[in-house]
Image (spheres, grey):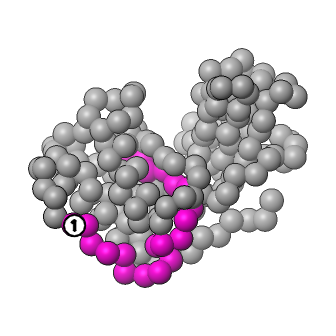
């Protein structure tokens, strides 16, 4: 897998993080003012991404779209709302929480089949395990945050999919990998 590098300027990153806050804020206040247009063409690229919200370093919502089928800025706005209000692990975000929310955006490379689980690099690759109707995805930063080694990362991705922890050894399991630019 060639290393994924999706370069955004500081202005573009600030725009996207502000877009997360504005999208959520508009929903909380029932304000239908249009969102600002993106400042550059690169924000029209079609890539998958995740928006994660944290409060005091603890996850408060994280939802993404792995397939790039809409312009990046539109997907950011949509995933911001999903992370704030539709992550089933958490109650809907409140206005007070929004003020204190830390925003992390992960822009994903396309997902491709992983040729060999021994090639997975903790901190570089994200994983998606799929078997039948079950699938689970973990972003590249997750094993770093939890101090996992490669095998633990593979087992935890299986667990996220609701499969046995050794599913990654099963030939029926599709293992897809990707990289992400995280900011």
Q: Secondary structure at mark 1?
A: loop
Magenta segment boundaries in residue numbering: 34-53
Above or below, 144 relative to 160: below
Q: Residue at x 50, y 77 (%)?
A: 42
Viewer-closest of 102 and 164: 164
Q: Residue at x 27, y 56 (%)?
A: 23
Q: Residue at x 44, y 57 (%)?
A: 75
Left or right of 109: which side holds 73?
left
Mark 1 residue crowding within 10 angstroms, few (<14) / some (14–19) / many (20+): few
Image location (x, y in percent) of residue 31? 13, 56
Image location (x, y in percent) of residue 22? 24, 60
Using the rendered view, name the quadrant where residue 63 is placed: top left
Left or right of 17: which side holds 120?
right
Task: Name the quadrant of the N terminus.
Answer: bottom right
Q: Residue at x 41, y 70 (%)?
A: 13
Residue 176 sits inside the magenta stretch: no
Question: Please, which residue is most extreme toward the front here?
Answer: 69
Q: Is residue 155 visible?
A: no
Question: Please, which residue is most extreme toward the top here?
Answer: 164
Viewer-closest of 143 and 173: 173
* Residue designated by label 1: 34
Using the rendered view, name the quadrant where residue 157 is placed: top right
Image location (x, y in percent) of residue 171? 87, 28
Viewer-closest of 163 and 58: 163
Using the rendered view, name the quadrant where residue 151 is placed: top right
Above or below, 91 relative to 144: above
Q: Is residue 166 visible?
A: yes
């Amino acid at each position: 897998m060639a290393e994924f590098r999706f370069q955004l300027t500081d202005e573009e990153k600030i725009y996207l993080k502000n877009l997360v806050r504005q999208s959520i804020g508009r929903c909380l206040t029932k304000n239908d003012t249009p969102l600002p247009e993106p400042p550059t063409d690169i924000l029209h690229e079609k890539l998958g991404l995740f928006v994660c919200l944290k409060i005091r370093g603890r996850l408060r919502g994280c939802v993404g779209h792995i397939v790039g089928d809409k312009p990046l800025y539109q997907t950011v706005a949509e995933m911001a709302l999903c992370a704030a209000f539709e992550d089933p692990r958490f109650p809907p975000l409140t206005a007070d929480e929004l003020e204190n929310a830390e925003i992390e955006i992960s822009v994903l490379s396309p997902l491709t089949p992983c040729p060999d689980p021994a090639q997975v690099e903790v901190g570089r690759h994200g994983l998606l395990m799929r078997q039948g109707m079950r699938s689970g995805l973990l972003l590249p930063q997750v094993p770093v945050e939890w101090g996992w080694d490669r095998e633990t990362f593979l087992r935890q991705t299986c667990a996220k999919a609701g499969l046995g922890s050794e599913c990654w050894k099963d030939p029926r399991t599709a293992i897809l990998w990707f990289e992400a630019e995280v900011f």
